[in-house]
Structure formats: C-alpha cells, structure tokens
Image (spheres, helix red, strand yellow):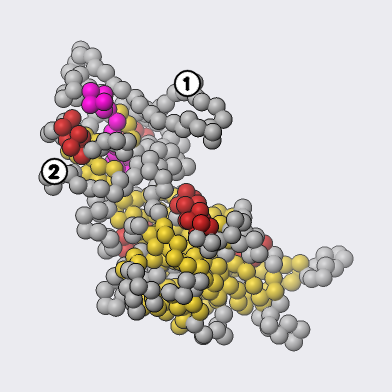
Amino acid sequence: DADHADFQGFSPFEAQSLENEALVNNTITATDDLLEYGFVARNSTDRRSLPHGQTGTITIAVRFLKDSQVARIPQKFSMTFVLANETTARSTRDVQNDTTLAMQNRLPNAIPFLIGTDDTAAGNTRMFVPNLRLSSTPTFLLEPILTSTALGQIDLAWDTNLSTPSTDSSGNWKFTPLTYSDIDHTTAGFRYLTATFRVEYMGSTAQSNLHLRAFSRQTNIAGSAVYDLRLFPNATFPLGEQLSEPIVAQTIHPLHAMQLGAIAPVPDPTASGFQAYLNPESNQLTQTARTQNLLSSSDSILDYGYQIRQCNPNCNPTFVNNSQGLVSVAVRIPRNYTLPVVPATVPPTTRTVKPFKFKFSFVISSDNTPRVSRAIVETTSQAQTRADTIGSPSLPNQLIFLGTDTDTTNNPKIYPIQLKSIKIADNTQIP
C-alpha cells in the first residue's frame, strides 16, 4: 500500500551507531540490542517531516506464519522501539511483492534502500544490504542469508603418514595431501594442526565459492565431524589405540591455518579459510544433501567449513575443468587429554594421552555468495582486510564476526553479521 509503506531498513553500521547513542542518552540499557528495521512517521504520502504542533501517522505492519507449524495464532503482542530522527529521507524496497520502480515512485527524491540480491536502482546513490537482522538470536528477514549447493561427499584425515589422493563421491574432485603443520603453544596449552590438500576439479560445470562443510554422522564421535581418532602407535596398538570419548572430539575446534608468530601462533593470511555459517544455512544444506543422497536422514551439516581457494596467480573463486586449488583444514586442540584408564580401575585412575591422527567427514559445497569469517584468535582488522578484497565490486561482501563482542565496520563494501556461536558437535558451541 503506497500510502502506508512505512517499513524502513537500516544497515548494521547505522543500527550500531544508534545503539551507541541511545546508550549514552540512557534511552536503552546495556543489555538491549538495536535491530535493523523500523517504521517511518509521515504527515502525507510524500512528506515525512512533523513540525511542532502537527500530527501524523505511522503504520506498523508485520507478517507471521499461519499454517500447521504454528500451534496457536498470536492474538496480541507488544513491540519496543526507539524514536529517532533521520537526517536524510530514504525509501525501502520491501521483500514482499515490492519493486524498485514502486519504491522510487513512493518518494522520488529519497535515497533507495535495497534488501536482497538485486541491487538495481536508478542513479548511483543508493544503499544496499543482503539482509536485515530481526533479533539478537540472530534471525533475519531473508532466511537463510546464504544458500549452498551440495556437490559431493568426502572424508579427509589428519594423518602425517598419508600422502595418497582421495576422490569424492561424485568423482569430480580429487584431494591430495601436501603438507602437515603441528605447532605447539606450550604456554596456552594448545596444539594447532593444519593439513593442506591440493584440490583438482575434473567436472565440466563451473563452480564458485567452494567449501568443505563439516557434517556429523551417526557413527562419528559425539555428533561431531570427527571419527577414527587414534593415539600414537605402540606395541599393544600398532595402529594407535582408538578413542571415542566425547570430550576429545568436542575440543577439536576449527579455525584458520596458523603460523609461528613473535610470541604466539598467528593466523596465516595466505591460508585463512575457516568459514562460519548460521544454523538455518546449515539446515538448508542438510536438506539439499539428503535429497541428493549424500547424507542419510540421521546426518546433519555443522556450522563450519573451510574455503577451497584458487590463487594462481589471482584468487579466482570459480573452478572450471582442470582447475587446481588448495584447502587447509585447521583445528586447535589441547596439548594433552586426561582420560580414565581403560579398563576402569578401582579406585578410578587417569592417564594423559595425545591424539595422533583422526578423520573428518565433509560435504563439498558451492555457495551463492562469497563470505569471510573471523575465527577464534583472529583480529577484527585481519578479517576486515580479507573481506575488503573479495567478491563483487558493487555488492557488499559478507563478514561474519564470530564471538560475543560488538565489533562492526562502517566500510560500505562489507556487510557485517554478528554470530555469537556455532555448533561443532552435540552440545558444543564455540567460541
């Protein structure tokens, strides 16, 4: 309804800026969270100013589910708002049956604000975001933000004795182990492990924004992507004793490939391929992979993966027949584990063990848009530098801020997404 099209979208930077101002003015508390939408007041179809003494109207409109998935239809509810004065007029294109032309006709002199994947609008002055955050959870106006296509399934190993290539279930992708890196950070009590594979594409259809997406299967350890986890070989166990304790798999945390730093290991900027995903994005790929019989009904995609990169000489996100690239599967684990002695003793006793090798289960995916994720131990500045160099020159690049901080960016080339945690195993979220 053009006379009541009062819905407005705001960029993450604008929402964060208003939140900071509202905190200073004591309009909200430190536990409140400004979201990325609102509604505009008006005194006529084309005038949005309300001089002193004038009255106006504001239309608050929402949509909710009305189907068998909703047990009870809401009868009433309340919403919380901050009253704000904007310095410029904007017209927001809604995602429900709205068009760019209709948006511009509603307020011809306003700045177009576009949501979604189509950034076409008359003139060069416009604002564009792929999505709007509707809650602190977070949930978004367009779910999921990113969609993925499943291309094949493959298991890869951290096993320094392994050098033979493996081919995925589709026969289109070959992974050959190239290097293994094991960095001991004795002060912090962690080991940083990185296995780098050469990736060869033998298919005929070009594929872009490629990743290895970790998934759990029923036979894996504790709902993780890890299985066949073994200790160092000895006379009793020449292949290494096999472990199945949940705590071991649950503390194998994904991150970027690491290298030695001045006082501690730091992310390797040439191999920073860790990727984080929202749970709805993982669920979308789970359903897609099950439909293609790449996953069983009990398997599920977890909320992380690793980018398959191609940098010869430029980092081209698209693979064609005979393209070659690299992928670095990197994790952080405790230097040692204290576990009960097996078989159990009376009284119970413990032993200190150190993992020697293990395997991961992955689905190869192609994402519909590029993304960068800030991993544990990575700084915001490092992540922003990477996000500033990928993707389309006209559309913002997605940057996941994984963690509980409130870091963001005012770089118009970057669309920041706050993500407090990701699932890596049953009952296990990081960071």
Locate residue 59, reporting x and y percent. Answer: 31, 22
Q: Earlier in the sequence, mark 1 or mark 2?
A: 1
Q: Is residue 187 above or below residue 131?
A: below
Determine whether 273 is above or below 230 in the image: above
Identify which residue is drawn at 51% across, 68% down. Answer: 153
Question: In this rendering, would 248 be left or right of 196?
Answer: right
Whether the magenta-drawn stretch holds residue 27 is answered as no
The answer to which image quadrant residue 71 occupies is top right
Judging from the image, what secondary structure is the residue with disc 2 in? loop
Depth order, front residue of 25/147? 147
How crowded pointer 2 is (Cα within 10 Å; few <14, some 14-19, many 20+) is rated as few
Amino acid, disc 2: Ala
The relative height of residue 289 versus residue 358 in the rendered view (above or below) is above
Q: Quadrant of residue 219?
A: bottom right
Q: Which residues are magenta?
A: 1-20
Q: How many marks?
A: 2
Residue annotated with mark 2: 122
Question: Residue 18: horizontal and vertical position, in percent?
Answer: 31, 36
Q: Disc 1 residue type?
A: Lys
Question: Is residue 13 highlighted in magenta?
Answer: yes
Q: Position of residue 46 (x, y in %)?
A: 16, 25
Q: Look at the image and tell me whether residue 53 can be seen.
A: yes
Residue beneath the point at 60% across and 77% down: 357
| Residue 76, numbered circle | 1
Q: Judge depth for marks 1 and 2 and give the one in front.
A: 2
Secondary element type, mark 1: loop
Residue drawn at the location 29% of the way across and 43% of the way down: 115
Q: Which mark is residue 368?
A: none
